[in-house]
Image (tube, helix red, strand yellow):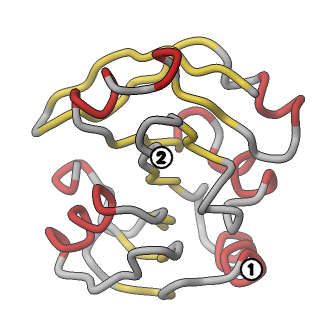
Amino acid sequence: FAEEMEPHALSLVGPGSTTQALLSVLGVQGSLLGVDAVRGDGTLLARAATRGELEALAERWPGPPHLVLSPIGGQGLVLGRGNQQISPRLLRAAGRQGLHVLAAPDKLRSLHGGVLRMDSGDPGLDMEFDGYLAVVTGHRERTMWPIATQ
């Protein structure tokens, strides 16, 4: 996925070991439990940023943000727990095109109920993501996976 990142685009990288591995490839020392703001060229813009800091950064950035997230193992939550810094406002700004989910095939197969889940705090917005989502599962590999709201 690092190869596909736009060098000057704003990417908000969520918590977890999978996203941490991406930051490592970019040469960025991010926060395991926080949301980090980076450019695709590996420039760290904010480490463990707050919701307000992320919204302010995205507001003044030329172009929509990219949200790079990994589901919580077993539960399948892409948004909801552990990444409340990603607000409905940021999700709306990124849109479906700007939501990038990274997960190993084994992690996807282990999901309770077999689906990814979305709980942004805005049920109407969550409904816009119902259906299938392309999930990055490896080097230049993607699989379509069902995503459902709470």
Q: What residue is disc 2 on?
A: 72
The picture places residue 112, in percent across and down from the top left corner, at 49, 23
User: Which disc, if any, is residue 56?
Assistant: 1
The residue nearer to you, when weighing 146 against 40, is: 146
What is the quadrant of residue 23 in the picture? Answer: bottom left
Q: Residue at x 33, y 60 (%)?
A: 19
Q: Residue at x 66, y 70 (%)?
A: 58
Residue 117 in the image: x percent, y percent?
Answer: 61, 30
Q: Please, is residue 115 above or below residue 136 in the view?
A: above
Q: Residues within 10 Å of mark 2 (few under 14, many from 20)?
A: many
Q: Quarter of the image containing the C terminus? A: top right
Q: Nearer the viewer, residue 21 or 28?
A: 21
Residue nearest the observer in this picture, 146 or 89 = 146
Percent across and percent down for residue 121 are: 84, 47
Q: Is residue 111 left or right of residue 86?
A: left
Q: Determine the secondary structure under disc 1.
A: helix
Q: Residues within 10 Å of mark 1 (few under 14, many from 20)?
A: few
Tell me the number on the disc at residue 5.
Answer: none
Residue 128 drawn above or below residue 60: above
